[in-house]
Image (cartoon, rainbow, N blue to C red):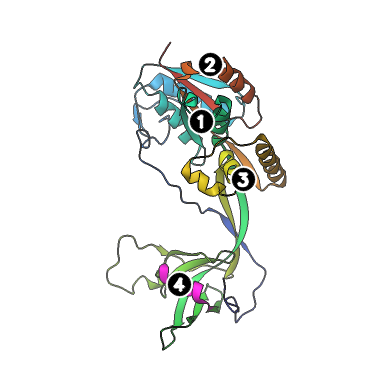
Amino acid sequence: AWSPRAWDTTSRMAAVPRVPETQDITRIERIGAHSHIRGLGLDDALEARMVSQGMVGQTNARKAAGVILQIIREGKIAGRALLIAGQPGTGKTAIAMGMAQSLGPDTPFTSISGSEIYSLEMSRTEALTQAFRRSIGVRIKEETEIIEGEVVEIQIDKPASGGGEKRGKLTLKTTEMETIYDLGTKMIEGLQKEKVQAGDVITIDKASGKISKLGRSFTRARDYDAMGSATKFVQCPEGELQKRKEVVHTVSLHEMDVINSRSQGFLALFAGDTGEIKPEIREQIDQKVSEWREEGKAEIVPGVLFIDEVHMLDVECYSFLNRALESAMSPVLVFATNRG
């Protein structure tokens, strides 16, 4: 928690200005067979380049996928499925991955095999529902108050005995103002963990106390004769120290289902043991998301659901998929098979 005087300032704050929207989420990417693919490798006329964006060959199929993407972007293909047929190793999964990458970095991409839904400890329709909801992203916008400035000086008073609470003062400045903040133990630990020193430009999230180091100020560029290649120089912030920042998080509907379905739901996300999720929970989440959409707090990001070995699905699965595709929030469904 903050110390009682953690945010006592020596100057009065004016109206809180806003700063542009930023992305503050770190995504964990694993290296896999298709992690090098960055798009379909098409030019502006939707003609496929021979080698581009990690894709090689299959020019006709890539062009056809590009045409489908254009229709998706214009919102004219909701509730349709796409079938890719070809021998093993001809690039069916690669084209589906390229479609997801071309739709944007936040677009969810889920890949499942037609045969794996039979071996899960849940019904087939539940497995398909979870795959569908993994492929629908929700982009949530929220505003947070931050303090952004260049560090002029950090003073930390350590008790002579070695025990007791640390106290300190942090002087921050922008091009227009300078303010001294009293620091509590948590803030001092945060500054030491980030190795913040005079001349660094930092942001502090007022709600969580998270400290982020943006880089060194240009005015301190000549402090040292040699600098590491990772050293980044930024301008001293302008205007007020205290600003409002709009942060964007993208989560899938399935992640929201899991977190709300059980007491230790957040841990279940990492364990992978989600089990069957009750329809009432999904209805509540859909209702909440639609409320956020009306208020302008969130928007839906339809992703791509790729089902390989689609010839393994039975009539029950196809009848369910047919119904699910009619939903307003349906992702783009890509089937792949090597029989045909």
Q: Quadrant of the N terminus?
A: bottom right
Image position of 102 (left or right of 242): left
Name the one closer to the observer, 228 or 255.
255
Q: Earlier in the sequence, mark 1 or mark 3?
A: 1
Amino acid type indicated by mark 2: Asp
Residue 274, compared with residue 24, is above or below; it is: above
Question: Looking at the rendered structure, which numbered label has been put on residue 260?
Answer: 3
**Marks 3/2: CA distance?**
31 Å
Q: Residue furthest top?
A: 340
Q: Earlier in the sequence, mark 1 or mark 2?
A: 1
Secondary structure of residue under mark 2: loop
**Disc 2: which residue:** 314
Image position of 264 (left or right of 289): left
Q: Earlier in the sequence, mark 4 or mark 1?
A: 1
Amino acid type indicated by mark 4: Glu
- Horizontal and vertical percent position of residue 74: 60, 30
Q: Which residues are magenta?
A: 183-194
Secondary structure of residue under mark 4: helix
Q: Quadrant of the C terminus?
A: top left
**Disc 4: which residue:** 189
**Marks 1/3: CA distance?**
20 Å
- Horizontal and vertical percent position of residue 277: 60, 37
Question: Looking at the rendered structure, which numbered label has been put on residue 145?
Answer: none
Q: Earlier in the sequence, mark 4 or mark 2?
A: 4
Amino acid type indicated by mark 3: Asn
Name the mark nearer the viewer: 4 or 2: 2
Amino acid type indicated by mark 1: Glu
Q: Alpha-carbon neighbours of circle 4 within 10 Å: few (<14), some, or many (≥20)? A: few
Q: Is the Cβ of the residue at disc 4 closer than 8 Å to that at disc 1?
A: no
